[in-house]
Image (tube, rainbow, N blue to C red):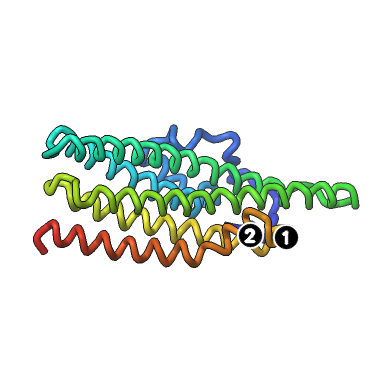
Amino acid sequence: MTDPGGSPTTTDDRSAAHSPSLDELTVRELVARLASRDPVPGGGSAAALAGSLAAALLAMVGALTTGRADSDETEASLREIGLAAANAQSGLLNLATLDANAYDAVVRARRLPRDTDETRRARAVHIAQATRLATDVPLRTAREAAAVLAIAERLVPLGSPHAISDIGVAAHLAAAAVRGAALNVRINLPFLDPVSADDPIVRGAAELDALLAEAAAAEARLADAVTRRMGG
């Protein structure tokens, strides 16, 4: 998300810095925040939240299946998968808050005064720093959500058949998270200061096409595996 206008603050504007963290809100409050005229949180946070929900579903399926496996090796795999899913759930939830804070910093930087050469230079520095962070966070989200798809692929042959549809839902949510995060990387790239090809963000953005292609392929593979395990 970008803030092209740099419009002055109004009484309806709210700063994420003075609002509860996203993970402190009820679901109803979070949805209301997303639906409000406040641009924070936005699509980047929504993408990260989708990825966190996907990971949570995988953690649930792993927990439901653990203790019912037919071998110690499968039990060990389920515990490992469950831990990976729980870590991804927490990491993506944190990225949702980081994304909101990063974009809020962009909004506030664009509203800094620019009436003198000195204030314009200071404003430009703040915008550049904030935009870099606002690009880096969704890049991290895309990578983490792609990792959730990999966790789902490990779980789909092992998960309880009674919860196999939850793995399918997780796959679609994680793939959507990758796509949504990639959009937020790309919309911010033109506003970054000129950097070298070795810049980590530039290199990461250059990998987005491959990341998106693999996410789409993983989503298709998982949809097929889930359908087969459901007897379709």
Residue type at mark 2 is Val
Q: Residues within 10 Å of mark 1 (few under 14, many from 20)?
A: few
Asked if marks 1 and 2 touch (Cβ < 8 Å), the reply is yes
Quadrant location of the C terminus in the rendered image? bottom left
Residue most extreme to the left:
231
| Residue to which mark 1 is pinned | 196
Residue 202 - label = 2
Disc 1, SS: loop
Residue 29 appears at what percent x and percent y?
Answer: 41, 40
- Compared with residue 172, is residue 60 higher up or lower down, i.e. above or below? above
24 sits to left or right of 77: right
Separation (CA) of disc 1 from disc 2 = 8 Å
222 sits to left or right of 93: left
Instruction: Name the residue at 40% across, 41% down.
Output: 88
Disc 2, SS: helix
Quadrant location of the N terminus in the rendered image? bottom right
